[in-house]
Image (cartoon, coloured by chain):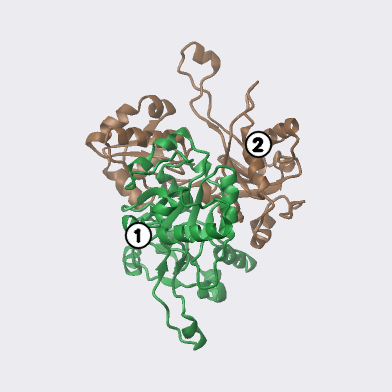
Chain colours: A green, B brown
C-alpha cells in the first residue's frame, strides 16, 4: 500500500482503515522516504510500525509472509507500490504461498511530477540515477535518455537514496554500523550527467540542455527550478532539502508547456524553447 | 486535487480536510469518473458538490476563479490532477489572476497500472484512444505505439469516455439533450487497433501482439486479462464494467515480468514471451 509522497496525512481513508485493522504494519524504508519521521507516523496511525530494510524484504520476507498467512499485514511504501522490483518480488512470493495480496495505490512521483507544468503524455520511459563511486559509473541511463530524446520526449530521472549502507571497512569486519543516509540532489545528478556526456559526446546531456529540478514533489514545500544542466549543477541551495528528482526536457512540447510554471522559476534565464 | 481512482475512501486525509473546509467544491466529470455516484461522495464528504462539465472548465471558468480569489475552492479530479490539458489550463488562468493554486496528488492510472505485474520503468509514452466515428479514425496513436515498440517498451493506452455528448441532431437544434455516457472497452480499443493495423501494416498492432486488458484499476474488483490483441477483442465480458485501459506489451521485459499476474489471467493460452 502506498502512503503518498509527503507526510502522514497523504494516506488515503481506505489505507488508514487498513493500517488501523492490520495485525502488523511494515514500512519499507530503503527505496524512498516520507518527509516526516516514524514517530509521527506511529502517532498518527495509532499503531507501532516495523521498519522494513532491504535485508528484511529481500532475505527475510518469510517473517512477513508467515504473519500474512494467518492475519492481515500492511506493507507500506512511499510512492508507487510497484515501483521497485523487490516489491513485485514480495507479491510473487506471497502468491506462491497462496497469501492473498491487495494493492492500495496512491500518489507516485511518476504522475505527481506533472505539477512542474509539463504534459505527462510527453514523457518517455523513466530512468534511475545511482550515486557514482570510485571506478563505478553506471552509464546505462544515458542510453535510455538518448532513446527518449530521439522521440522528442521528456525523461523523469529518479535519484538514488542510500540508507543503512555500510562502509567497506565495517562490512569487512562484520560491524553493523551504518553510514548516515544520503539522498542524491539535482546538482549531483546534473554533474553525473555532464560527466557521462564528456565520455559519450552524443549531446543528450550537453551542458546547455534544458531540465527541471524538482524537490519534495507533492508536499507543501514543493519546488521546481528550470535551467540548463550546467545551471542545475548549482541549484541545490534553491531547491532545498530532499527528495529531489530531475526532468530532462525533450523537444516535443505542448503549447501549454511554454506557458507554465517554468516562467516562475528562480532562474530567469531559462526558457522552454529548446535549441 | 486528485480523488484517487475507485471510490469515496480513496481520497487522502489531507484532501478530505481541504474538501471539508473549502467554500465550494467542484468535481470534474468529463475526463474520468469514480466508480461511485455523486450522492455517495456528497454524503461521505459532508459537502454539496458542483459537477464541472467540460463547458464549465473550458468556457466558464470565471465562476470558479472568481470564487477562488476570495475563498478556498476545491477542484476535484479523478486520477491525475495534471492528466488533462484543460486542468493545466485552469491552473494557468488562475495564476494569471494571481489566485494561488495548490495541487494535492493521489493515485493515477499511470502508476497504478503497475499492479498488472509489468515494471513501470519499461513503459514508454502514454497514449490515448478515442472512439472512432464514421469517417473519423484518428490514427496518430499508431505512431506513438510504433515509437515505443521500436524501443521495446510497453505502452499504456487510455480509453475514451464520452459524457454529456449531444447527438448532431440535438446539437443542430440547440437541444440540451445528452446521449447516455459511453466508456470505451478493451474490446473496442483492440478492434480499433486492428483496424488501423490493416491500413498501416507495420505490425505494431498485429493481431498476435500481446497485450493486457485492465479494468477498474485500483479498486476492489480490479481485473487484468492478458492475451493477443485478437483475443482481447472478446475480453469485455471477462473484464466487466468500466473503466478499462489497455497495455500493449513491448519486447523489453524484466525477468520478473515473466512470472507475474499474467499467469493467473483467465486466458490460459497467453504468455509473456513475445515472438
Looking at the image, residue B94 lies above or below residue A157: above
Residue B150 shows up from this direction? yes
Element at label 2: helix
Q: Position of residue B257 (x, y in %)?
A: 65, 58
Residue at the outermost left position: B70
Which residue is pictured at 59% across the width and 43% down the height? A151
Which residue is pictured at 48% across the width and 47% down the height? B108
Q: In this rendering, do the residues under marks 2 and 1 share a single chain?
A: no
Q: Quick one: A188 or B81, which is closer to the camera? A: A188
For residue B226, side relative to residue A266 (left or right) = right
Q: Which residue is mark 2?
A: B142
Chain containing the residue with disc 2: B
Which residue is pictured at 64% across the width and 42% down the height? B147
Q: Position of residue B205 (x, y in %)?
A: 71, 40
Residue at the outermost top position: B173
For residue A115, side relative to residue B149 (left or right) = left
For residue A40, side relative to residue B213 (left or right) = left
Q: Quick one: A207 or B94, which is closer to the camera? A: A207
Q: Position of residue B265 (x, y in %)?
A: 68, 53
Residue A83 shows up from this direction? no
Q: Nearer the viewer, mark 2 or mark 1?
A: 2
Element at label 1: helix
Q: Which residue is mark 1?
A: A8
Chain containing the residue with disc 1: A
Amino acid at each position: 500500500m502506498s502512503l503518498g509522497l509527503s507526510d502522514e496525512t497523504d494516506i488515503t481513508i481506505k489505507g488508514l482503515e487498513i493500517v488501523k485493522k492490520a495485525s502488523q504494519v511494515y514500512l519499507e524504508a530503503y527505496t524512498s522516504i516520507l518527509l516526516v519521521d516514524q514517530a509521527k507516523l506511529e502517532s498518527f496511525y495509532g499503531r507501532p510500525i516495523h521498519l522494513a530494510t532491504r535485508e528484511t524484504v529481500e532475505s527475510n520476507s518469510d517473517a512477513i509472509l508467515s504473519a500474512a498467512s494467518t492475519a492481515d499485514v500492511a506493507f507500506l511504501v512511499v510512492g508507487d507500490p510497484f515501483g521497485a522490483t523487490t516489491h513485485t518480488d514480495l507479491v510473487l512470493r506471497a502468491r506462491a504461498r497462496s497469501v492473498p495480496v491487495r494493492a492500495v495505490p496512491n500518489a507516485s512521483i511518476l504522475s505527481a511530477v506533472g505539477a512542474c507544468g509539463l504534459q505527462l503524455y510527453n514523457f518517455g520511459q523513466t530512468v534511475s540515477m545511482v550515486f557514482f563511486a570510485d571506478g563505478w559509473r553506471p552509464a546505462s541511463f544515458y542510453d535510455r535518455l538518448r532513446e527518449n530524446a530521439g522521440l522528442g520526449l521528456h525523461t523523469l530521472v529518479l535519484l538514488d537514496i542510500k540508507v543503512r549502507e555500510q562502509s567497506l571497512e565495517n562490512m569487512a569486519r562484520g560491524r553493523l554500523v551504518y553510514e548516515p543516509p544520503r539522498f542524491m540532489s539535482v546538482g549531483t545528478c546534473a554533474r553525473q550527467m555532464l560527466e557521462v556526456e564528456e565520455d559519450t559526446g552524443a549531446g543528450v546531456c550537453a551542458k546547455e540542455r534544458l531540465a527541471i529540478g524538482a524537490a519534495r514533489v507533492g508536499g507543501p514545500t514543493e519546488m521546481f527550478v528550470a535551467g540548463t544542466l550546467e545551471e542545475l549543477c548549482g541549484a541545490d541551495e534553491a531547491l532545498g532539502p530532499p527528495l529531489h528528482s530531475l526532468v530532462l526536457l525533450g523537444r516535443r512540447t505542448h503549447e501549454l508547456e511554454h506557458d507554465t510554471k517554468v516562467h516562475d522559476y528562480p532562474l530567469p534565464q531559462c526558457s522552454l524553447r529548446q535549441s
